Image (cartoon, grey):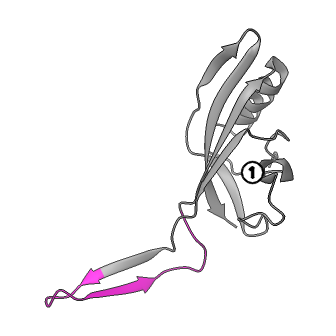
Amino acid sequence: MATFPSLTPSSRSLSYGDYPQETYEGVSGGNVRFKFGSDRVTQTLTLGFDYLTEAEMQQLLDHYEGQQGSLISFAVPAQVWAGYTTPPVAAVDYEWRYAGPFNVAIASPLRYSTSIELVSVPI
C-alpha cells in the first residue's frame, strides 16, 4: 500500500456517504429498513490541486499508476486534512481508492491543476 503523495490540496470537499441498508416497502406503503454494516460506504473525497510543479504533478500520476488506477486502496497523509484538528474520516477505519481517472490541466507555463476524486474503503 503506497500512501498518497504528501501534497496539501487547494480545495477539498467530502460527502459522508451512508450506512449500507436495504429498504422494503410494504403493501400499505410503510417502509422497513435493514442496516447491513457499521461502516459508512460511498464516502467521496474530492481534492483540488492548483499550480502544481511538474515534479508534484508527476508524484500524483506515479501514485495513480502504482495503485493500478482504482484497483488498490491506500492511506492519505495528514496534509490532505490540513486545517482540521481531527480528520473527519478516521485513518484507522478507512482507506481510499481512486474513483476513476483524473484530468490534468495546464494552469500556466510549467504549472498544472487537477481534481482527484477518492472513494472510501472500510478496513
- Give how far across and how far down residue 24 sits, in percent: 28, 82
Q: Quick one: which residue is furthest to the top in this view?
A: 109
- Give how far across and how far down residue 72 sits, in percent: 68, 47
Asked if the magenta segment contains residue 36, the reply would be yes
Disc 1 secondary structure class:
loop
- Give how far across and how far down residue 78 sits, in percent: 85, 53
Task: Kindly report the secondary structure that dominates the magenta region of the rendered protein.
Answer: loop
Q: Amino acid at mark 1?
A: Phe
Asked if residue 83 can be seen in this view, the reply is: yes
- Graded by Cα atoms within 10 Å as few (under 14), some (14 to 19) or many (20 or more), the crowding at tag 1 reads some
**Residue behind mark 1:** 74
Q: Magenta region: which residues? A: 24-41
Quadrant hosting residue 120 = bottom right
Q: Which one is nearer the viewer's eye here, 10 or 63?
A: 10
* 101 vs 39: above or below: above
Quadrant hosting residue 51 = top right
Q: Which one is nearer the viewer's eye here, 122 or 11?
A: 11
Q: Which one is nearer the viewer's eye here, 57 or 37?
A: 57
